[in-house]
Image: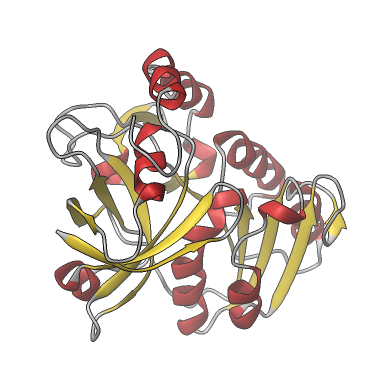
Amino acid sequence: MHTILKREQLSEQVFRIRVVAPLIAEARQAGQFVLVQVDTEFGERIPLTIADADAEQGWITLIFQAVGGTTMRLAALQEGDAVPAILGPLGTPTHVEQLGHVVCVCGGIGAAPMYPIAQAMKAAGNRVTIILGARNHDLIILQEEMRSLADDLILVTDDGSAGRKALVTEPLKELCQAPSPPDLVVAIGPPIMMKFAVETTRPFAVRTVVSLNTIMVDGTGMCGGCRVTVGGQTRFVCMDGPEFDGHQVDFENMMKRLQSYKTQEDAARHTCKIGRNP
């Protein structure tokens, strides 16, 4: 059992919880994730990135959007309650090295998994530019945390209610067109955002890494639920990822697979309300 030490609501549907998990906190590296199960008898397992951790104090931070049955149940838990099962750290850690200029492109909730990656890239001696995007001002998360570590923070919203009125691809293209383009772009967010970020960098041959969040069950690659096509080959996000060369990812196939359980997801969403179990 993993006791919740702190719970915050970052936006209408986004929550941040700090939970006791000393072994995970000690072992985790940037880019890794955990599988969380709220109902240990019948519940699903959902992958959540470890947004932060403290090995000495023995806690990890999870940030999630309450959009489905499991995340709604997780959002209903309060400080002092316990998350029954957290498995991890899982996945291949981010490859961190001193490259020069790293651009981190975050779309919405993608800021959560990006935060530890940006931290690690900065600690490795890179110049870090962060493009933080959301549909509107109310959906922006981790703005101050990102500002504190970025050399340059570019804030964009679809409606112009905060920062610049633009999609994340607009400033990304400008950076790629500069006399000294980025040495690496890391893009995390909704699949459609990552797809267009990749297409933005492709003409400039700027290396682009994406972090994929797919359907997962066991986290070992045995169930096959998280399989994606990368460079014409089948890969498993839980074992081979979650990070891949964005220019090689078949996003169309991945987005179709994400709809596999839409009927069941819709049913769970309709029967579950934040603050109570169905």
Name the quarter where the N terminus is drawn.
bottom left
Considering depth in this image, is 202 or 134 the residue closer to the camera? 134
Q: Residue 5, position in %: x, y?
A: 31, 71
Up the image or down, 223 lies above or below 189; here it is: above
Confirm whether residue 208 shows in the render.
no
Q: Is residue 75 above or below residue 259?
A: below
Q: Quadrant of the C terminus?
A: top left
The residue lying toward the viewer, choosing from 277 and 13, is 277
Q: Quadrant of residue 81?
A: bottom left
Q: How many marks can you see?
A: 0
Q: Nearer the viewer, residue 131 or 181?
A: 131
The quadrant where residue 213 appears: top left
Q: Is residue 38 visible?
A: yes
Q: Residue at x 63, y 56 (%)?
A: 105
The residue furthest top is 263
Give residue 57's position: percent from left, percent from top: 25, 84
Q: Is 275 situated above or below 21?
A: above
